[in-house]
Image: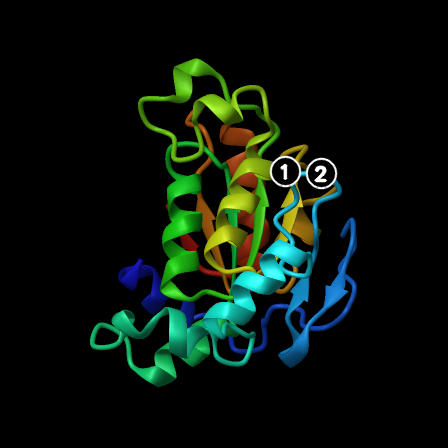
Amino acid sequence: AWALQIQIECANPRITPQRGGVNRGARVEKRVPRGYAYRAKESEDAMDPHNIEWSDTLKKWGLTPENYVLKALPRNLGVLSRNDQARLARRGVAIAGMGGVGGLHLITLARAGVGAFHISDFDRFEPANFNRQYGARIPTLGRPKTDVLRADALAVNPFLDIRSFDRGINAENVDAFLDGVDLFLDGLDFFVPEVRRLVYGRAREKGIPVVT
């Protein structure tokens, strides 16, 4: 994750995650201080910091959008400086594939302090995923990978800005997938070279670094 931080900081400074506005395709948006946009899942198991359980927990531990990095991520300091952490909180990463590579990177980068993500995957978890995929667990069998990993990331930082692309990446949505991010992280399957070629090409045109 720390090596990826260097890549993020080298990204074009013109490209920054959207803050406080409505992104295309968002299901529900709730505004919270400091410009973070929280999009709650519509399902009954949505991990929503504004419901009673989460509000009480956040209040008990004194966690707010303003102090989350300071109170939740202090042990990153030393590897990262306070300025590094503040900059990561304003950065966005697009991750294609929520399997053995992308899912783990999403959670690692959320714990590192990255503030916004675009994630994509059209697949659902199945037993064969258990040996290598972060989100593969008995309770997640049959569930969309983007839903599971989005909930896992929000359980680490409920103030994240996350947009899901649950039909994968194609020519119609690749621009939206890369819109506003500072880095593209490739977690695509080996056997989809046409999708990889599409995303790499658009990332290059937009000046977005790629990590694979």
Q: Tag on residue 44?
A: 2
Image quarter of residue 87: bottom left
Q: Mark 1: which secondary structure?
A: loop
- Residue bearing mark 1: 169
Q: Earlier in the sequence, mark 1 or mark 2?
A: 2
- What residue is shown at x 67% (from left), y 36% (from top)? 170
| Dot 1 amino acid type | Ile
- What residue is shown at x 38% (from left), y 38% (from top)? 101
**Percent position of residue 109, x then y:** 40, 57
Q: Nearer the viewer, residue 117 or 125?
A: 125
**Percent position of residue 196, x then y:** 51, 37
Q: Nearer the viewer, residue 88 or 13?
A: 88
| Dot 2 amino acid type | Glu
- What residue is shown at x 62% (from left), y 59% (from top)? 49
Residue density around tag 2, few if under 14, some if 14–19, many if 20 or more, within 10 Å: few
Position above or below: 185 against 38 = above
Residue density around tag 1, few if under 14, some if 14–19, many if 20 or more, within 10 Å: many
Give the colour scheme shown: rainbow
